[in-house]
Amino acid sequence: MTDFGFWSLIPPLLAIGLAIKTKQVVFSLSLGIFVGYLIIQEGNLFEGLLSTITAFVDVFQSKGNTRTIILTLIIGALIQLIKYSGGINGFIAWVQKRLAGQSNFKGKIQATSALTGFLIFVESNISILTVGTIFRPLFDKHKIPREKLAYLADSSSAPSCVLFPLNAWGAYVMGLLLAFPEVDPFTTLIYSIPFNFYAILTLIFVFWLSFSGKEYGEMKRITERRESKEIGKTDESEERTSSPLNMVIPIAVMVLTMPFFLIYGGWDGMTEGGFADKVWFSISNGSGSEAVLNACFSGFLVAAIMYGFQKMLTIKTFIDQSFKGMNDMVVMAVLMVLAFAIGNLCNELGTGIYVSRVTSSWLIPELAPALIFIISSFIAFATGTSWGTFAIMISIGVPLSFAVDANLYLVISAILGGGVFGDHCSPISDTTLIASVASGCDHIDHVRTQLPYALFTGGLAVICYLIFGFFV
């Protein structure tokens, strides 16, 4: 694949800079995409505009992208049904009852939200949407900034997803590793987990910040402002309060059926070998996006049946509430289309290839893991996609690790951790966009408050890779 050299950096950096300056994410992403296709069309305005329009349509050529956008709408419908049933209010009441009278009440609320995000390791978008929507009323009630909720949702989701192989993330990475016959995908992924320093350190930091009540930088200033004034009316929805199981059961079904659909989707591809061999083969060959969509729909269906038996729903209210929830996700779906489009653009421009090409000459065995982490971080930051970064860097990192005799598990973990780190820092990342929308806070405020925390754990991860690069 060729690249457009330094020009390939202009569109993503322009989109990032404009988003920070204007706080108009849709405009910034759209302009960045247009400028990118203007570069591809060698300055022809008319062709650049037509290519931009085509780029939005081409997003749906990818089944994975389409499934993810549909998934967002179904998640919106599911969350609205849970709201309507009173399950969210019941869960909030249960949390408050359990924590009432205990010391550090606010800290435990935050830790509970982070733990929820950690446990929903099926898919990062599902985790972020669930945590942001469910805990927003509770955070508002106790004057905890929504920016903190966005940080907890964002920073507990992708790190947990990348540390657990039985989900869409694991299937995707193992699929990429299948391209190398000398590498066992499942074993390599498992052995790389202890070295994924960014994911591990971020989760530790998330829970420490939750329990300690410590805040730094912009997050501290926003927290002090929120505590000194009244919060306006929240979007705490229906007055009905029911059993917290009305929330827990559909979400548990969604999480627990994900591995089943992942294995089921890839089961027929292998005709030889024992049961365990077929399971691992199915996990690495099943469609992660298809499994997540099926799991999400299962949770949605279980919720509808449950509430129907409880006589909370009629056919009319089921349809009305489902469409209401989908409508709440339209803005998010548009942002995801834009995020996917700029990711495709960066692929056409060869942004990741250019970055890796100009930096690969620096790599020596001992420094390789740390430098690969930094390169992966920059690619994810500039392109707004951790999965795109994985695809680029695994194709480069695996052969490179053999060529320079670097530790393969360190290299893989550096790629995965760097992709997540850059994604957390990027204003054009789909997960960063979803976290701010789901939590109901300004997107750029979320980026500004999360960035110092991500940089801190990212910096520690670099130090760890430097140490382990020399001694492992």
Image (tube, helix red, strand yellow):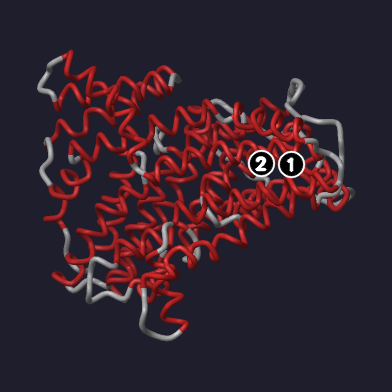
Q: Residue at x 33, y 44 (%)?
A: 380
Mark 2 closeness class: few <14, some 14–19, many ≥20 residues within 10 Å? many
The reply to whether callout 2 and callout 1 are in contact (CB within 8 Å) is yes
Above/below status of 154 relative to 6: below
Residue 271 sits in which quadrant? bottom left
> Furthest residue to the top?
46
Q: Front-most of 87 and 469?
A: 87
Q: Position of residue 103 (x, y in %)?
A: 82, 51
Q: Position of residue 193 (x, y in %)?
A: 43, 68
Q: Which residue, given by chain and number where applicable, does mark 2 sit on?
A: 78
Above/below status of 160 relative to 49: below
The amino acid beneath tag 2 is Leu
Q: Front-most of 405 and 305?
A: 305
Mark 1 closeness class: few <14, some 14–19, many ≥20 residues within 10 Å? many
Q: Which mark is residue 82?
A: 1
Q: Which mark is residue 69?
A: none
The amino acid beneath tag 1 is Ile
